[in-house]
Structures are given as structure tokens and as C-alpha cells.
Amino acid sequence: MRLPVPLTIISALSLCCGLLCQRANAQTEPAKKTPDATVSGKVTIKGKPMSGVVVGLRLSEPSQFDSPFKATSDQDGKYRITNVPSGRYQVAAVAPAFVISDVNKSWGQSLVIGEGDNVEGIDFDLVKGGVITGEVVDADGHPIVEESINLLSADSPRSGASYHLASTDDRGVYRIFGIRSGRYKVSVGEESNGIYSRGGRGRRSLPITFHPDTADPAKAAVIEVGEGTEVTKIDITLGHTPEGFAVSGRVVDGETSKPVSDVPISLTKITIIDANGTSGYGGGTDVRSNVDGAFRLEKLPAGKYSISIQPPPESDLRAEPVAFDVIDQEVTGLLIKTATGASLSGIVTLEGTRDRKNLGAPAPSWLSVHLRNDGLRFTSSQSAQIKPDGSFRIGGLLAGNVSFSVGSWGPTGNAKAITISRVERDGVVQPNGIQVQSGEHISGIRIVAAYSSGSIRGVVKVENGALPPSGHLVISLSKVGDSNETMGGGTAVDARGHFLIEGLAAGTYEMTVSAFVPEWRQRPRTSKQLVAVTDGAATDVMLTIDLTPPPIR
């Protein structure tokens, strides 16, 4: 990826020539050591103090799962966490069988802490969670033992939020507790495309089955769970596992129709979520096309699929996926047509190598290509490994405008990131990315990267209105004059209006603060400013966003 925080992720906006921006009133100062911070608040149950509840702080990084800083509420419900270093955190109260009453804080609160801060009033009110119990048996009535039970929200199925919250015991019985009030679907087993499974326990995973006895999520029974209530007899009966059907076809060159051999076949299982959309997952199989370009997959369960090829990143081959349905018989005659995609090759060099050695930071190990095709109105990303000598090659690309990002498998530190200083093609700087034509092979690319330790910390002030509890603020960045600087998603502003963005290269950035509120039926309100960042220093800013409703047209 964790304790996920539902965030609206927004893309970094490119700077338009005619855009009127105001330069932020910013102050830059070198980083200096100051005392660690404290975080305090109160834990209650419907307003009454609750003792013995652990409140923990977790760094807001995908690789961080533990809460290294924590405290337990006393008899008055009060807690105080001390010796907290500066950084971005997620803070939550953890009490088994209870849930946080505010649905907007169900996964905790984001919190930006500065050095020496004394953060007060981070309170949590809890309510008793609901319980679901049941039994899982096979078609002959035998208990299904040690299988994970999944809980899926029936109110927001498109979020794909499925949680493994319990396992069956030796009787096939399960019990899930600490469930937030709502509507749910319960299932056992894993979705599988028939070629591989996600079980990982040395045995084939069970096909997914929803309560009471269906593999179709649209036909699953919906369970209503209330605060502190227990719903019983949510039993699941597995059907006899079908043998499945074979699927076969050929891989051929799209221009010559000649067979393409020894190409790995990829398969995607498609699931219909609702009337408005589908989801899919899949990956490579152990099947390859033979000398005649033929392939054959065995024992695919009934369902919707798409099939394609999965060549290595260095290969120039590409192919559009071919959709098909498995119903009640073998599928034959599938034809995968390959084409020659564009390719990029070059070298990644790292500036400031001496500083990197002092930091003990690893060299860049992967490269991502971000391709934008305005004509087809899509964006895509593709990654490749950077070799020890810094060289790279990535193929099978469509036509479009390409920008890059680089990174390392090793940790770089909370305040340091690998950023791209410039991209060159045959010695010429490419500030607006590289335009790639269909089937073009481009070499002589030089990507100059550096470890960056600049940061922006600040506060967002809301004027002419208040942000509803369901709303949140997000900061996005784009580096002025450099489309190769891909900043990814957005940075959340915490409940106090504070934010922190680290690992920035020196330069001028356009900052955009956006207000997102689900109940608003219009585009998010935004405000923009320019900020100058210095490497190795923190830049303090104050941003303002105006929530005045737009005029009615």
C-alpha cells in the first residue's frame, strides 16, 4: 500500500502562461533542532470519559503500519503523547469492539506536527460497534476451516473496500465485531481468474462466495448492522467448484499476421460492480504462445475476461486486450494482434553523489514513464528497472507526450526524495517532456536526478464560510516551467489547517489548495500561489481559500 485515509487525489496542474498568481509571503529558514512535540486530547463514549483506550500516532507513509508513539487514556478519558518528532501523522483511538462515532474520522485524523508543537484537543468519541456471526460450510455441509471472511460495504461498492476481519474456526463458525453501522455484504474465498490464486498458503484458494450462496456480488444478500447490535446466522454455503472451460487462440503480428511465439499471456477477470461500471484484476500466467503463436488456458470458471500479452519492459511489443465470456463451453479462436510500440532508452545520473553517500541513501533503482495522449484522452504509466550503470530501456509505448519520475526501493528518509532536475535528449534540455511518435525509437535520453530536502510547511485559512465535517482540503504542487517534475497526487491539510510537504527540489512551485465537499454539486473551490523552495530549508507559507458560494447563473 495500512490504515487508509479516504482522500480525494488531484493531479498537479500545469502552469498556464496567462494564469494570474500571487507570490506567497514566504519565509525560508534553515532547519534547526527544537524540542519534540506533544499531542493530547480526550476519549469518550457518547460524551462520557473512557479509560484504557490506546491512542497512537502513525507516520503518514505507505510503508508505515505501526504506531511508534502512543498513550493510554486515564480515568478522565484524557491522554497525552510526548516526545513526538515533527512530521505528518495519522492519529487514531484503538478500542476493540468500538468505532469512532464521527464517520469522517473513522480511520482517525491526519495531523501535521511541527517541532516543539503542543497540539491539544484531538478528541475521539466512540460508540459500540456491531457484530456479525455465521457459519461457512461446503455443498455437503462440511465446515470450512481457517478461511478469511470478507466484509464489503453495500453502500459504496465502487470503492472496492473489502476487509479481512475474521477467520472461521474448527467448526466453520466466524464472528466479526467492531463494525460501523451500515449495510454490508459478507463473503468467503478469493476472486480467481482460474490461473493463479492469492491464497499464498500452499493450497488453492476457495472461489469467492457471498452470503447466502452466490458468487455474484450483485446477488449477494445485504446485511443491516446497527450500533451495538448483533446480526446472527449470516451463513455461507459453497457450491461445488466447477471444473471450468478451456480458452485458446493465437498471437499474431498485427501487420503481417505471422505467428508471434514465446510471448507470455496475461489474463484479467472482469467483475460487474453495478450498472455504471466494472472492475478487473489479473496478471501474468504461466502460459506462453508456441512456435505457431498458439496458446491454451485450462479450467477457467464462467465469467467475463480479457486476454493480452505481457512482454518484459524492454520489449517493443504491445497488444490491445481481447474481451471474451466463458459461459458453458470451451472458447476458441481468440486472436491477439501485436504491434510495435515506441521505445525510450538512455541513462539516469545522480547529482550530489557525495551528499548521497553521507546520507546513506540508495541510488535510483526504478523509472516510471508517464504518457499523455490528448487525442485519445488518456494517461498511462509504465515502469522499468534502472540498471547498476544507470542505463534504462522501456518499450511497448503508445504515442504521446512523456514525462518521468524516478525512485529507489530503499528508504530515503522522511524528508528526502529523489527528484528530477532536468531531462535531456541528445544534449538538449526538454522542459515540456518528450513527444513520442507511434513506433518511434528514441535514444540519447539523459535524466539528471538529485536527492532533495527542501520542504514547505504552512497553514490554510478559510474565509467566508466553514468547511463541513465531510469536507477536506488538499494541496497540490507543480514546478514552474518543468513538466518533467511529476508531483503525483495531493497532500492532505489536517483538521487544524496545517500541512507539510517534504522532499522538494529547489525551485519555484505553484501551490493549489482545493476544497472538496461531497454534498457540493459544483467543481472544488481552489486558490493558487507561487512559493520559492530552497534545498535543505523549510519555507513557511500562509494560504487563503475563499468559500463564498459562486453566483447562481
Image: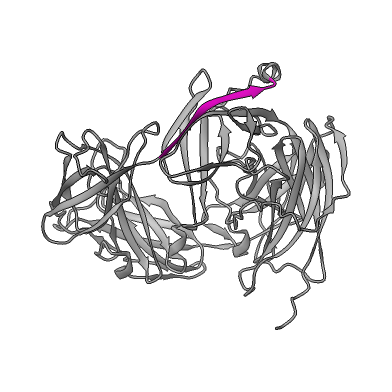
Rendering coords of residue 375 (x, y %): 49, 57
- Residue name at image x 37 percent, y 36 percent: 316
Q: Position of residue 261 (x, y in %)?
A: 21, 35
Left or right of 377 in this view: 258: left
Relative horizontal placement of residue 372, taking residue 132 as reference (left or right): right
Instruction: Tell me how the rendering is colored.
Output: one colour
Q: Quadrant of the C terminus?
A: bottom right
Residue at the bottom extreme, as displayed:
553
Between 395 and 7, the one lying in front of the other is: 395
Majority SS type along the magenta span: strand
- Residue stretch rendered in magenta on the structure: 342-352
310 or 29, nearer to the observer: 310
Q: Nearer the viewer, residue 205 or 143?
A: 205
Q: Quadrant of residue 126?
A: bottom right
Between 201 and 454, the residue placed more toward the observer is: 454
Left or right, 237 with reference to 8: left
- Note whether 312 is above or below 308 in the view shown: above
Residue 534 appearing in the image: yes
Position of 528 relative to 265 (above/below): below
Q: Position of residue 54 (x, y in %)?
A: 63, 47
- Residue 115 visible within the image: no
Examine the structure image and report whether residue 348 is included in the region drawn in magenta: yes
